[in-house]
Image (tube, rainbow, N blue to C red):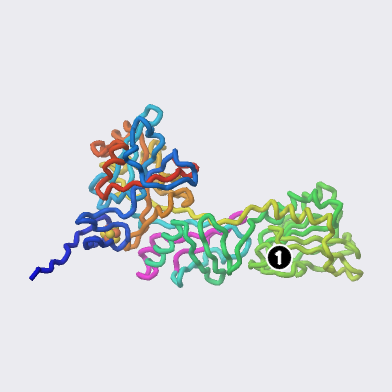
């Protein structure tokens, strides 16, 4: 009788979860596996290859073709995607790669960093009101972030952060981590705002607000729109009102109209007058005209004043900030605006507003803090790395994408997820997001800050032999703006 033996599990120590993984199985994060009794990284190490045209073929790296004489160091950039993690941080980063650029020795330290302190800032190009500033944003019913400031033509969300990841319930942390992961990997995520809208967000795609795909980003606020196009309306219509939740503009009163000698019309706008021809709060925020809640723009008009120029036959164009909604009216004998067909001569002015709107998009910026322990994978004296980054001697990239490092203490960075290779982000169930991080620095500076100089390897060696977690390599095209 043959004795049945249970396959031996081995422990992955790439994060605090410490999975025991059986032969042929993968760990809890889907990123590591037990292959032939060895822990390997399931995804290949990703190399950005300048020689592959944008949008070109993604392929396994052809090691047989590797020849330092044929492929210059500057053509290849080893990203941290698929590299493995430094955890538990007592050891050097998975790859510390030497490169010669313009005759100078550089080192790139790559590691997949585990970020408990991280989140995304989301910019959603839309006029439609998503929710009030401070409103809770939910995914699958769990609080994952909040609405923050409105920006010019966009609304902003701050999602994730350590409070949602680890400071709330287990479910809140799990859902937050999943939402962040999918947003960072450019997948679509449905979010709902308390007392606001439901929006499907996907990096690089138009937002879908309450099932309606947003098409255009406003050309400007109502006041700016008046300023930009006042001259085009002159002589074609007596009055123009740009309906906007922020600033509703009125051409006859606006400085742009005054400069052009535009006559008064006796119009009355029901809103809080800011300066001439600029009105706040003409309605409540909503999904209607110009981000207001109105469907009939005439509701923002008060009685017309004959002493200031109102008269039967006066013509009025009302239009939203994206040019999506518009109406043309003529005052009747009782000075009531009556809807009328838009004269052909005015149509190009309406089209011009729409034409000047950009396509509405969602932008997802990953934001995280490279913590103290992660830095020890780079140098034995972590604060020196921080100082080197702050002194701009060390360049920080995220999967090859440029980052913005916040001034002040620490290494708190932001990166546009559109600049990374596909599926560059991962997670661990602690929960936390795993993001690729590369530090590029001159060899001299690396030595000076106490770097793990003995672990520096030639790029050819990395491509040939891989690292602790396997030897698979894939080459992908560089994304615009990456090293
Ligand atoms: S969750 Fe992933 S990284 Fe963490 S121990 Fe398990 S397999 Fe390794």
Q: How many marks?
A: 1
The location of residue 340, given as percent across then percent down, is 84, 66
Relative horizontal placement of residue 287, taking residue 471 as reference (left or right):
right
Relative horizontal placement of residue 40, taking residue 69 as reference (left or right):
left
Residue sitting farthest toward the left: 1
The location of residue 98, given as percent across then percent down, is 32, 35
Name the quadrant where ligand 1 sits. Answer: bottom left
The image quadrant that residue 328 belongs to is bottom right
Q: Is residue 151 magenta?
A: yes
Mark 1 falls on what kind of element?
A: loop
Residue sitting farthest toward the front: 1
On the image, numbered disc 1 is attached to which residue?
282
Q: Which residues are magenta?
A: 143-172
Relative horizontal placement of residue 419, taking residue 6 as reference (left or right):
right
Residue sitting farthest toward the top: 103
Disc 1 within 8 angstroms of ligand 1 (CB): no
The image quadrant that residue 315 belongs to is bottom right
The location of residue 97, given as percent across then percent down, is 31, 38
Q: Is residue 406 visible?
A: no
Report crowding for label 1: few under 14, some 14 to 19, many 20 or more residues within 10 A (C-alpha).
Answer: many
Q: Is residue 286 magenta?
A: no
Q: Quick check: 151 above or below 292?
A: above
Query: What residue is shown at x 33% (from left), y 37% (from top)?
Result: 66
Picture quarter with the N terminus: bottom left
Picture quarter with the C terminus: top left
Q: Is residue 205 visible?
A: yes
The location of residue 29, given as percent across then percent down, is 32, 61
Query: What residue is shown at x 69% (from left), y 51% (from top)?
Result: 356
Query: What residue is shown at x 24% (from left), y 56% (from top)?
Result: 35
Q: Is residue 401 or residue 313 the one in the foreground? A: 401
């Amino acid at each position: 009788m043959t004795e049945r033996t249970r396959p031996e599990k081995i422990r992955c120590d790439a994060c605090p979860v410490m999975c025991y993984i059986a032969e042929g199985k993968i760990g809890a994060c889907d990123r590591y596996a037990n292959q032939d009794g060895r822990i390997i990284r399931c995804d290949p190490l990703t190399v950005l290859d300048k020689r592959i045209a944008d949008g070109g073929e993604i392929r396994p790296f052809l090691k047989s073709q590797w020849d330092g004489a044929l492929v210059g160091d500057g053509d290849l950039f080893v990203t941290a995607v698929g590299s493995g993690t430094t955890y538990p941080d007592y050891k050097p980063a998975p790859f510390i790669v030497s490169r010669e650029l313009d005759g100078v020795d550089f080192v790139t330290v790559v590691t997949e960093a585990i970020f408990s302190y991280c989140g995304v800032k989301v910019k959603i190009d839309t006029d439609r009101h998503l929710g009030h500033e401070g409103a809770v944003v939910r995914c699958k019913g769990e609080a994952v972030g909040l609405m923050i400031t409105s920006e010019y033509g966009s609304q902003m969300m701050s999602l994730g952060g350590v409070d949602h990841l680890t400071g709330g319930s287990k479910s809140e942390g799990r859902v937050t981590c999943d939402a962040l992961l999918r947003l960072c990997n450019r997948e679509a995520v449905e979010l709902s705002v308390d007392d606001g809208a439901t929006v499907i967000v996907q990096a690089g795609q138009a937002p879908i607000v309450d099932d309606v795909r947003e098409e255009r980003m406003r050309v400007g606020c109502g006041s700016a729109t008046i300023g930009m196009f006042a001259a085009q309306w002159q002589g074609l219509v007596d009055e123009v009102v740009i309906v906007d939740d922020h600033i509703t503009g009125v051409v006859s009163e606006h400085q742009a109209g005054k400069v052009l000698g535009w006559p008064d019309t006796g119009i009355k706008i029901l809103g809080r007058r800011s300066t001439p021809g600029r009105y706040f709060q003409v309605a409540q925020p909503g999904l209607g005209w110009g981000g207001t809640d109105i469907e009939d723009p005439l509701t923002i008009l008060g009685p017309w004043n004959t002493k200031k120029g109102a008269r039967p036959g006066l013509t009025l164009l009302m239009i939203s900030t994206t040019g999506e909604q518009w109406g043309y009216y003529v005052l009747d004998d009782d000075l009531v605006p009556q809807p009328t067909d838009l004269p052909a001569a005015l149509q190009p002015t309406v089209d011009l507003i729409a034409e000047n709107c950009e396509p509405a998009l969602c932008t997802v910026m990953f934001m995280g803090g490279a913590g103290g322990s992660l830095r020890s994978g780079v140098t034995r004296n972590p604060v020196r790395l921080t100082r080197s980054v702050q002194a701009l001697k060390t360049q920080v990239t995220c999967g090859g994408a440029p980052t913005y490092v916040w001034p002040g203490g620490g290494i708190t960075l932001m990166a546009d997820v559109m600049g990374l290779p596909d599926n560059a982000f991962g997670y661990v169930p602690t929960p936390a997001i795993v993001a690729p991080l590369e530090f590029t620095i001159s060899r001299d500076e690396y030595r000076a800050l106490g770097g793990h100089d003995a672990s520096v390897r030639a790029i050819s060696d990395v491509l040939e032999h891989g690292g602790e977690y396997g030897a698979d390599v894939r080459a992908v095209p560089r994304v615009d703006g990456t090293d």
